[in-house]
Amino acid sequence: MGGARWSGLEKQDMRLPDLKRGGGILLVLTPYALLLAQHPAGGKPVHFASDVKPVLRAHCASCHSGASAAGGLDVQTVNSLQKGGDSGPSVIVGKPDKSLLLQRILGLGGLPRMPKGQSPLSDADVDTLRQWIAAGAKDDATEVRHWAYVAPVKPKVPTRVSSWVRNPIDAFALDRMTKAGLRPSPEASPETLIRRLSLDLTGLPPTLGEVDAFTSDRKPNAYEHLVDRLLASPHFGERLALPWLDAARYADSNGFQQDGDNYQYVWRDWVVRAFNHNMPFDQFTVEQLAGDLLPNPTPDQILATAFNRCHMLNGEGGAIPEEQRNVVLFDRVDVTATTFLGLTMACARCHDHKYDPLTQRDYYSMLAYFNRVPESGVPSGAGQYRIAAPAMPFPAEPDRSRWLALQQRVSELSSQSAKESKADSAPQALAAWIRDQRAALGEVPSMSEWEASGPYPTDTFDHAFDAKFAPETDGAKAHWNPHPEWADGVAHDLSGENAATYLRRTLHATQAAHVTLSLGSDDGVKAWVNGQLLASHKVTRGVAPDQEVIEAPLRPGDNQLLVKIVNGGGATGFYFRLAPNGLAARIVDLLRKDPTKAELQELDAFRLANGPGRKSLKQAQQELADFSAKLPQVMVMSDAMPRKTHIYFRGNYEVPLDEVNASTPAALSPPRPTYPANRLGLARWIVSPENPLTARVQVNHFWQMLWGRGLVKTSENFGVQCEPPVQQALLDWLAVDFREHGWNVKRLLKMMVMSSTYRQSSRVPPALRERDPENQYLARGARFRVSSLFIRDLALATSGLLNPEMGGKPVYPYQPKGIWDGLSITKERDFTYPQSTGADLYRRSLYTFWRRTVGPANMFDAATRQACTVRPSMTSTPLHALTTLNDPTWVEAGRVLAQHLLRSGLGSDRQRAALAFRTICQRPPSDREAKILVRSLNRARDSFRANPKAASEFLAVGESPRDGKLDSVEHAALANLCLSIFNLDEALTRE
Amino acid sequence: MNPFFERDLRLSRRQFFGKAANGIGVMALGGLLATDGFGRMFQKKGGLPPLPGLPHFPPKAKRVIMLWQGGAPSQVDLFDYKPGLEKHRLEELPQSLRQGTRLSTMTATQGRYPVLPAIRPFKQYGESGMWLSEMLPFIGSIADDICLVRSMNTESVNHAPGVTYFLTGSPIPGRPSMGAWATYGLGSMTEELPSFVVMTSSDVGKTCGQLFYDYYWGSGFIPSKYQGVRFRSEGEPILYLDNPPGISHDLRRGVLNDIAELDHQRLDEYGDPEIETRITQYELAFKMQTSVPELLDISHEPSAVLEMYGPDVHRLGSYARNCLLARRLAERGVRFVQLMHAGWDQHMNLSTQLAFQCRDTDQPSAALVKDLKQRGMLDDTIVVWMGEFGRTVFVQGDVNNPSGHGRDHFGAAYSMWIAGGGFKGGTVYGETDDFCYKIVKDPVQVHDMQATILHQLGIDHQKLTYRYQGRDFRLTDVAGNVVPALFA
């Protein structure tokens, strides 16, 4: 194992310098050329998977692979190589020179050299192939496991003595770069460091006061103090949340036609809080994947599961719910596997994974964990908000505190009333209660099959709800279809929009009894027993169990149950279950089985809560319920509707094959037997020490955040296809250390930013750039463009416009006129962009309303929030330049900053220009830079002086008020200078 | 500073900026770098370079103009000529045919499926004698230039998945679109305009609830510089194209020079090639501010050309105007132009709206083909006219109310046409049964058509891949066969 791992690394070394380039570079690279000569490819065993396959894949597989492989030769497996193609076997074991593979690659035997039209393989690559064939051309796939599928073992920290080494990160980095013949770069300047740290840890630049305090702080622990302050900042959570929201494809609307809004922003705030409270990452994982399945989950724990409900929802008129539900399930598997495990499972949806040991069975076994949600697959409701059940009422700030207080009161009253009835809370009392209840359970009326009539379409939902159709007036005149397939306790789909569907069945009781009917409906519902209207609820919602719980008196003999389901738009369906004795379905379940200890407590809680003398409790509960009714409905997870899961032929849900049970991929170590076989078990397995991926993948995410690039570059994929990391020892050490220290995120980040490795200057000497363009050896600091969301924050913060308020409903800052107009074609709602006013215009970008069909136009290069994204895109296009040059956000920020400068008391152009530069870039300009700035200021002043009207127009951009006493030409010229500085590469970049 | 680095840094300064510092402006720098030993670190020009090895073989066409007919035009009424349907008018569609065909939920449970023949007669056009609806006289006039495919089929029966499927290869959003793939593979032919441009239009009455989402021209997981740039008909044609109020062209020019000079100093000091890229992009942005208004200004178009596109060409944002602009974009080196027109979703207004749709799109679509032909550009321009699927031969809605007749979505068999770029004009390919319901000859699946279009651009659809999440993705997913029978 170790051999294979390291031989992969040496290959990286081999590939790096391209020595065939211009003379000047060759000169500086001479030491590395010498280094190369000391590391011939030989001397270590060559493995197929780690050495040979990458060569073949890079040079041959684009033509010679798959069903239509050129010449019938597939180079992807040892078997297919030995079998060869049309020209016969390509490998003769033990005889490299007689093997067609080598002959063709070397261009021997009079045939053209392979790969055709491409540059020849390097000597090192040819040697690798030669050695492998000479050594027996063995397939080691079963012997050598891919490094990322083996749980990391904490490697020994290299002991290289150097004053540069501050912590183990530096020890690993120095060791690796020294072996590669490199040396660390000097430390960055204090101004650069505080800007870097502030942007990395809070997404905001430091204020000038903060810069001055830091640069003049001579205490040895000044840097650490700064780090601690930033880690404690509430903006830390906002900064950390951004990549997490990208991964969770968080958005404020569903996508697709109608693009209804949702309330998932309540979950966004949960993420911010979790990071700010430094929630251990294992808990962070478990709560988001399975908070609802924890024992006695808190509302926050259920809220956390909204992670898996941030998927798109297709509410098109003709959408087939079951198809859409499966799209959602696929999405959930992909998001969970990519975000937590760095695994690409999507390939296995249609067939076994080509490279990774993931089978189609694995895929659907993972899917089975998520296939228990009482959901239809399509959203319901009309107007602005359209959501899909299950959802829970949950307040955003500032309602949250009142809501928590109400809950607290209910909880207190519950325990108080429990105390009051201590007398009858003895174990015997519970046992007696259970006996009585069980006896009563026996009297279950027998029920006929369902029959259905309809749908009866109308023009509106109201009409459909109110109109009395034949089944309601005279059942005999209606046409009824039998539905023997409709089982109880499961939701069934119906059809029709603005339509009513009637359902009926007969309940036969041997004696008079009271039963409880549990109904769910999408959308509205009415129910009658023996002609008596017992329920009528005009509502738009998705179907879920226990939405209506009805007490129904039964007479001896036959009783007629009639249910009317009324749908507005989108999906429709119903749920039914008989719950005798007025008990919730859940309680009946518990009574019917041998309850565990926890379940006994649940029964007891139910018994006590439903006993007499609980008046104030009931009142408080009612108050809470009323308050909750008006709250945002956050889509969350639930396991209330278990379903069978099948493998789908080629991913087609209409062609189910074998049934599978929920389980984790077979090739990875299995979950412990103590883990439950549900999402909670999955979550526990993901954060278990046996899991080889999770800690590595997460450490890599954090590294990527600070270095712009993960130690594993493909942060979304740790599978066999990912490049073996140069810094695997460091990655493994960090992963194990992270886990061993309680998945402590702030501790991990602190260790990273305290390192000398992090503090290096990001200047790139040409030799180093040539030698290590991607900074894999960490011999310099990282330099990369800031996320466009933070670029906007930076403009707001440095101009003083930023409103630091946290959380709550999304806001609507400046967007181009008519940004959503394309959506208004539907006429179904008003899609005029509801631009915010006042302070809401200046909130952090994180809080901008994210419409999934049309993302915010000025937040370029951002994740689309349509599918999981864990690696940020950092491109540079003319459109980005146009945005930061012309968008009112930056123009206004320039104006407001200029106003501060004019009022600062600084008189000279040079002083003002220098302060503008320092405010935005956090360092004083050099003399040469200052001269250019002053020249630029003069240029603008001349232009505006010649055309004062232009100055006024320019100053009129943006809603924030302007000090009218200021000279408009001066103000405009300075504002234009500030706008230019916002557009400097340095300003857009974290150095 | 480490003296080792100091030396290299000076070397770099001399090589890169000795000249720039002496006053040669930004513009010269691109050329300088291209010939420099370091040039390969950077893009040679501001445009997007082609991938090495592309095109895979000599291309027939350089560019694509996609005329997307959103909402799904009725092939029953326009393209798939079935004179025999008349004798089955309002008869129930045979149950044996219907079985196993995917329908949307709007009619899947309808209960009755009465056959409705084409609402207007067909006639023969051109020397090829192609049968098309008399509602399409202009397209009829280019019958000998178009290749009509009557055997398209798709798995999707709802709009967004259907559009996403054809334009990105998957019904689920998130993959790169065809224009992004083409630009990624072949690079750009212009520096002054985006290489992939999208324009949208809608029927005047907005009867059709079809929306155009930006993932229809997105770049998915390939870098966002390959995504389509939407030109808008109201406000700025490209978002943020115009200088802020009060900032003159000259002032901006000066400001950009200042920014570039400061950026050069940073580059000098830091040596990060990204700085160089940024300088180039700012320069391109400035060029675009001139080239885009010039592109959109049609005042110098001869009146004969304007007349050819029809009176709507004078209305900003109309399909006709967009067709004319598509030609102007093609002339200026834009690789992929995607027009998206909404309005073809006739669920219950076939008798009135279909004619309006034809009126809005027939003349401009044909004019574009003629215009390209006149300029000798049709040979290397592929023009595609299609929607996301077709429509049912049976009536949706109340049979007894002819004014409310409509047709539902139908993916199992539909029609499209394609012209130029080496496609065979005057040809009809593929055939459906007597009820336009099942393909009986030469089916063409979505991935097949994608592969065929890419082929004419000189792209082997199996080789144009992008590695993401450990997998080599391609436009055609894991399927697709080129249909050589469509080639001239």
Image (cartoon, rainbow, N blue to C red):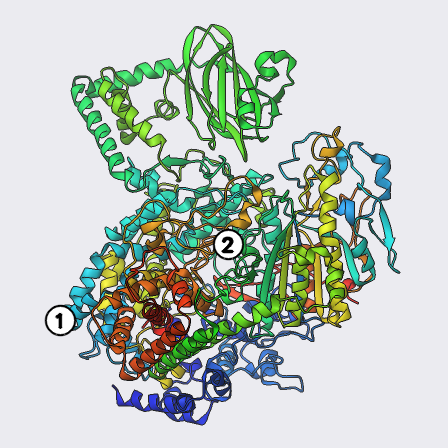
| Circle 2: element type | helix
Q: Quadrant of residue A729?
A: bottom left
Which of the marked residues, 1 or 2, is nearer the chain's N terminus? 1
Tell me the amino acid under the disc marked 1.
Asp
Tell me if I can see residue A331 in this picture: yes
x and y percentages locating residue B481 in the rendered image? 69, 61
Residue displayed at 44% across by 36% down: A389
Chain where mark 1 sits: A
Residue A481 in the figure: left or right of residue A150: right
Which quadrant is the N terminus of chain B positioned in?
bottom left
Q: Is residue A309 above or below residue A570?
A: below
In this view, which residue lies farthest toward the left? A219
Residue A941 in the figure: left or right of residue B302: left
Residue A209 in the figure: left or right of residue A350: left
The crowd level at tag 1 (other Cα within 10 Å; few <14, some 14-19, many 20+) is few
Which quadrant is the C terminus of chain B positioned in?
bottom right
Residue displayed at 31% across by 14% down: A436
Which of the two marks, 1 or 2, is nearer to us in this view? 1
Tell me the amino acid under the disc marked 2.
Ala
Viewer-proximal residue among A296 and B233: B233
| Circle 1: element type | loop
Residue A476 in the figure: left or right of residue B280: right
Q: Which mark is residue A346?
A: 2
Real-space Cα distance between discs 1 and 2? 52 Å
x and y percentages locating residue A547 in the rendered image? 42, 26
Q: Disc 1 designates what residue?
A: A217
Viewer-proximal residue among A972 and A921: A972
Same chain, labels 1 and 2 = yes
x and y percentages locating residue A945 in the rendered image? 38, 73
Tell me if I can see residue A743 in this picture: no
Q: Quadrant of residue A301?
A: top left
